[in-house]
Image (spheres, rainbow, N blue to C red):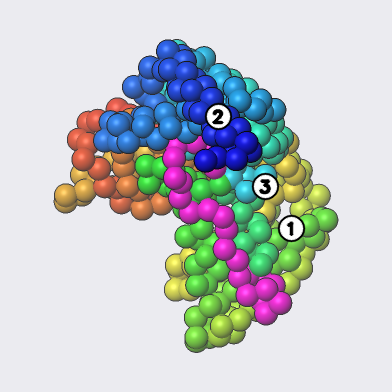
Amino acid sequence: MHTPREATRAAAAGQLEQTATALRAAFERQRPVVHPDLRSTAVDAQLEARERRICERRFIQRELEPQPIDTCAVRGQQLQSSQPQRQRQRFLPYPNVARRLRAQPQLIVSARQAVIRAHQKFLYGDGNTRLLKYVREYGEPKDFADFVYLSQVAQAEGIELAALHHRASRPRTMGTLYWQLNDVWPGASWSSMDWYGRWKALQFHARRFYADVAVAALRSRSETTVSLINDTPEPVAAELRLRVLDVDGKLLHEERKPVTLAAAGVTAFGKFTDAELLRGADPKRTFAAFELRTHDTTLSRGVIYFEAAKDLVLPDPGLRADIAADGGAFRVTVSAQKLARALWLDFGDIDVELADNALTLLPGESITLQLQSKATLAELKENMKLQSLRTR
């Protein structure tokens, strides 16, 4: 026989199960049809079942014990109105979704829309407000696709600054790992690769700032400290070239010095005040490039600016690109007449593997990259788009 307490518990459990069953039925009546653009066709059933279980639990929990914030409560409006959008602390960029936004302009959305808030887990959905604060250091987003681009630029340059600072602080700090590499679902996150495995700007930057040999040009309080990093077991003989240029390409100042990078260590090169570098030039139209070179090959480059990105007076970089077949792959050559900061090559709905991306081309510079894709040459040419801080 059950004691009175056990009987009361059993009755309460039965009542709870009846309530949960009724709520599941109510959830089924409310559950929206998932927009086909929200899911990869290869995992439709798996994702829908997973989202259904999560939202069912939250739906029942909300009815039994109201919560202050519930993203599933508004899924009806969320999933019918938009599509998925693709960092820790301040760097939470969105994934490469501009392709769908451009192909389906009716789906262009705002960072304040319910579906975007639901895919943003930082600050209970309000992380986009924090993210927008840092994005605006690069300019005001024109639309959501521009917000995606700027969020990735902010993340890549921010993490690069921190990673190079830690590497240059050796042996006090022996390096750094950033959070995070990849995603467990499509959404805004700290990752450097999105859920589909496509590289964000940070992943391309990481390959450069984590290179065995790198130059760290770090500007703080109107002074730039230059450190030369060598993680190889042997000394490296090279040349450090400093150039100060305006955004149109006019050379204002240049220095070249032979350097020897200590094995498995950091070599201090020097400190430069803004006044020493600018020499009266307009800080909004001037930048400095520190390049570590050997045998006419640039091993690493650090570029510093004297104003926030949003305050720079950047000209149209005059970007040009050409794609050609190269055996079983392709090669793309991009050139810039003037400074092209945060260059991004995008190919719309076409998946491509580029040898490099998220670059800064100096005035008069060109670069040739290998490209892998199942698309045809004509399709690649038709869908290619070049973005920079000036032309976005």
Seen at 66% across and 34% down, the residue is 124
Q: x and y percent of residue 151 in the render?
A: 58, 38
Q: x and y percent of residue 355 in the render?
A: 36, 53
On screen, residue 324 above or below 296 = above
The image quadrant of residue 255 is bottom right
Q: Nearer the viewer, residue 150 or 127?
A: 127
Is residue 126 something one can see in this rendering? Answer: yes
Side of 55 relative to 279 (left or right): left
The image quadrant of residue 45 is top left
- Seen as rendered, the residue at the extreme front is 1
Q: Assess whether residue 104 is covered by the magenta stretch.
A: no
> Which residue in the structure is indicated by mark 2?
11
In primary-sequence order, the first of circles 3 and 2 is 2
Type of amino acid under label 1: Arg
Residue 10, numbered circle? none
Q: Assess whether residue 186 is covered by the magenta stretch.
A: yes
> Which residue in the structure is indicated by mark 1?
219
Q: Nearer the viewer, mark 3 or mark 2?
A: 2
Q: CA distance from mark 1 to mark 3?
A: 22 Å
Region rendered in magenta: 167-189
